[in-house]
Image (cartoon, grey):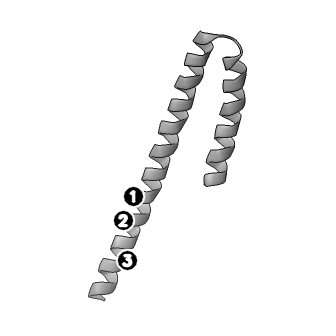
């Protein structure tokens, strides 16, 4: 998962460098794109963490009563 997210940010980074060379307005657009991808990736990581922790919690509760 970390490699996929790193790859996505690498592609976004290339686009940001191109936008940064075009002027101040494009730098703002680049910041917005980076912030969006950061928020999406953080949400994905939190969702995966929540699913894993729920599964672990269910396994612990199941083994307690088994």
- Residue 43 vs 64, above or below: the answer is above
From the image, tell me which residue sits under label 3. Answer: 59
Q: Are marks 1 and 2 in contact (CB under 8 Å)?
A: yes
Dot 1: within a 10 Å radius of its alpha carbon, few (fewer than 14), some, or many (20 or more) residues? few
From the image, tell me which residue sits under label 2. Answer: 54
- Residue 16 vs 6, above or below: the answer is above
Q: Residue at x 61, y 53 (%)?
A: 2
**Which comes sooner in the sequence, label 2 or label 3?**
2
Dot 2: within a 10 Å radius of its alpha carbon, few (fewer than 14), some, or many (20 or more) residues? few
- Residue 47 vs 32, above or below: the answer is below
Instruction: Report x, y in % for residue 31.
Output: 55, 24
**Which comes sooner in the sequence, label 1 or label 3?**
1
Instruction: Report x, y in % for residue 39.
Output: 47, 37
61 lies left or right of 7: left
Mark 1 or mark 3, whichever is nearer to me: 1
| Residue at the extreme left | 65
Give the alpha-carbon distance from disc 1 to disc 2, as whole Å: 6 Å
Give the alpha-carbon distance from disc 2 to disc 3, as whole Å: 9 Å
From the image, tell me which residue sits under label 1. Answer: 50
Q: Return the residue nearer the eye: 55 or 4.
A: 4
Q: Residue at x 65, y 46 (%)?
A: 6
Quarter of the image for the C terminus: give it. Answer: bottom left
Q: Residue at x 58, y 10 (%)?
A: 25
Dot 3: within a 10 Å radius of its alpha carbon, few (fewer than 14), some, or many (20 or more) residues? few
Q: Residue at x 67, y 18 (%)?
A: 20
Q: Element under label 2? A: helix
């Amino acid at each position: 998962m970390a490699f996929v997210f790193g790859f996505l940010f690498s592609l976004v980074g290339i686009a940001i460098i191109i936008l940064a060379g075009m002027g101040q307005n494009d730098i703002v657009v680049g910041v917005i794109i980076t912030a969006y991808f950061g928020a999406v990736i953080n949400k994905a990581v939190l969702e995966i963490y929540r699913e894993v922790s729920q599964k672990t919690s269910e396994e612990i509760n199941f083994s307690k009563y088994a």
